[in-house]
Amino acid sequence: MPKSSLSFFRFHVSFTARIISFLMAAWLLLPCIAYGEITIDGLIDESEWKDAQVFQNFTVVDPWTLDAPRLSTETRVVSLPEGLAVAFICEQPPGEVRTRTTTMPDPSNFDSDYVSLMIDFDGSHQVAYEFSVSLAGSYRDGTITRETSFSYDWDGVWKRAVNEDDQHWTVEILLPWSIVAMREGDGKVRRMAVCFQRFLNSRTEKFSFPAISASRAVFKSEFAKIEVAEFREQQLDISPYVTVLSDLVENSTKGKAGLDLFWKPSSNFQLAATANPDFGQVESDDLVINFSTTETFFSDKRPFFTENQGMFSMWLPMQSFIVHTRRIGAESDDGGRVSDIDGAFKVIGSAGPVNFGVLAAQEKGDAGRSFYAGRVEIPEENWSVGVATTYTKRPFINRTALVHTLDYTFNQDKIIANGRFLISDIDEDAQSETGYGGYTTIEYMPSDRWRIRAEYTRYDDKLDINDMGYINRNNYHEEYFYGEWRQTGFTEDSRTAGVTWTGRMINRNNLGGMLIHRSLYFERKEKMRSGSEMAFNITYLFPAYDDLLSRGNGPVYLNDRLTTNLSYSTQRRGIWRKSFEMSVFQEGYNDWATSLSGSVSLYPNEKITLDLTIKPLWSRDWLIWVQDDNRLASFSRRQLSANFGTTWFPAEQHEVRLRAQWLVIDADLEQAFQIGPESRLVPGNDAIDNFAAINFGLQLRYRYEIAPLSNFYMVYSRGGLDYIYNQEEGTLGLFSKSTSLRKSDQILLKLSYRF
């Protein structure tokens, strides 16, 4: 390591160590904080619970029968100076199977019985939060934006505990008033909206109060309104960190230290700031080899950008976003390396009827980019309106990008409408372009069983939000129609608990009037009383043009195509959980492809989980661009991907996780093409090499949870991506060869503590 870098590292480590020592000393001198008279131990035995609000009228919402549950559930809510306390009392006598599986925080699937508290602290329908606890004591927290968009990137500091007896299991939760920025009440009463849910794993049944489901068009807006005593709390959290990264390929070691600060002087204002932040990942992204014309989207897992980020969760159709924080600290404009960040700050708050947020970040160096985002919204009972602006400055390429948006929502009885309008102003090398776009959606629910949705989107060819946001493509307008019907009322002796029928039609043209996508989709999904699920769907693609495939060398006419898919999955039975999926589809010009997917999870005991997924694919007609003018080629493709993971909890607060991923593509040329008259493909005799792509990723991670949001990590990761031309090895040989990839090989140590 150069002397300058070593001195810089020693300075930061020494400086941060002094801060940590000072703060720990101050923290140890603070008196212990008691949560009133309630001890968060899972036992609902304190006198305060007798005066709590009680909610008992739960309903079966998955499957959507709206029946009274076989097992009773009771929820109690009481407001304390220290926070909002919530208790669940779940009837589950010895005859009912109890499933306990320990998982790492924020699992997508608990594989366990669990309860969920979902709460909109303002009652404004803008952002809600989920707090879930499983029978094994595992937990999940996250945000709910729009009506049904769940994200588990956000993490909060809260208390929870579980207790069991022969007839029941109980959960206690305490949410400090400082956990999120929320509007001020009237000084005596806080009005909020809540939803309580319970999941019975053995039958995959979900009970809810009120009778609502996230699988419906309207969810968050139908939370039950409650009033609780208002209390206010200030908070100051300081989170210093130190990391050491040893690169075994470059034979180098680097250190880094920094500080995050979260300050909440009142309930309706919160400031987060970071200096020399650590945005090194201790999480791993899924492996992707992308031959498509659109960028792969990865969500952000970095704590600073997930903390109270709901204000900036501005969604667009086709999984696009106005603010995509993975742009910050991404590949630099001067060579593709990952950018370092000097600092960033974020302010979230409210003033009267207005909510507001500001986000800013600055990268290091002469090529460092500047990112700014601001948003203001006015939420009311049945409607809201908001405006936002993002600004990105990229000095290395002499480019600035300014994006303005206006959004609205309206919810009345059985109709919900929302939309967003956009303007982008791009200035690069003294050349300016202004683009326009927007979408609007209307959903109608004539009954509990029906859901109808219509959406219109239009982006012109100059709209560009990708400097700070993410958009799949521009230059199109689309009409989207969706219908859903839920079939219930099956007899008790029927194996079927419920069936959902869905249909969808999409019509998409570019602004030149060319049809680029038209499809019909139908699906039948059956929920069985055993907890298993089976689904079958079919998609018909009409003949259309692909105006992106040749990368600007002209549109390509594609024949009509068909895709069918059958899937079956079981809930955990004993120590196993299994799923299977098969697809037959057309992805090229004429011929067919088949893919299979099999997954199995094994639970040797409540502290160990093993997961294995294998996905083989065979295609006789994989049509791709070959990176040379208007040439395309159809390949015979053999693809194999595998994902193995295991998680072990050897003791309280200790977690060991291993994750390995393989992705292999073995492609042999079938036919070369050129774009001919009327955009039809014409067979050619061009010499195009066969090729293979191999990708491998391995991560072994140990985490010790010192305290909530305070962790020590030790992570080993290795892997890489490679392309091989005119390969002689078969698919299995390439799969084995991928394991030896070592483009990246490193060890990361990280210590962070939140005071």
Image (cartoon, rainbow, N blue to C red):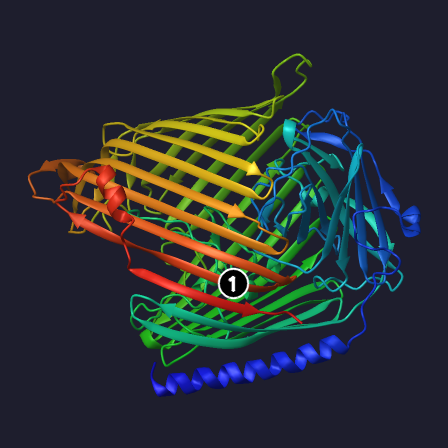
Q: Is residue 69 left or right of residue 334?
A: right
Residue named by callout 1? 713
Whether residue 294 appears in this view of the structure is no
Disc count in the image? 1
Task: Find residue 505 and report its image quarter.
Answer: top left
Residue at 38 percent of width and 36 percent of height: 614
> Where the N terminus falls, by quadrant?
bottom left
Q: Is residue 655 left or right of residue 449?
A: left
| Front residue of 186 and 13 | 13
Q: Secondary structure at mark 1?
A: strand
Q: Position of residue 124 (x, y in %)?
A: 72, 53
At label 1, the amino acid type is: Tyr
Graded by Cα atoms within 10 Å as few (under 14), some (14 to 19) or many (20 or more), the crowding at tag 1 reads some
Task: Find residue 217 and report its image quarter.
Answer: top right
> Where the C terminus falls, by quadrant?
bottom right
| Front residue of 218 and 214 | 214
Whether residue 640 appears in this view of the structure is yes
Q: Is residue 753 left or right of residue 611?
A: right
Q: Is residue 304 left or right of residue 645?
A: right
Residue at 83 percent of width and 36 percent of height: 56
Residue 183 vertical placement versus 725 (above, below): below
| Front residue of 755 and 300 | 755
Residue 532 vertical placement versus 687 (above, below): above
Residue at 32 percent of width and 33 percent of height: 616
Q: Position of residue 360 (x, y in %)?
A: 53, 72
Task: Find residue 363 and report its image quarter.
Answer: bottom left
Q: Position of residue 143 (x, y in %)?
A: 63, 52
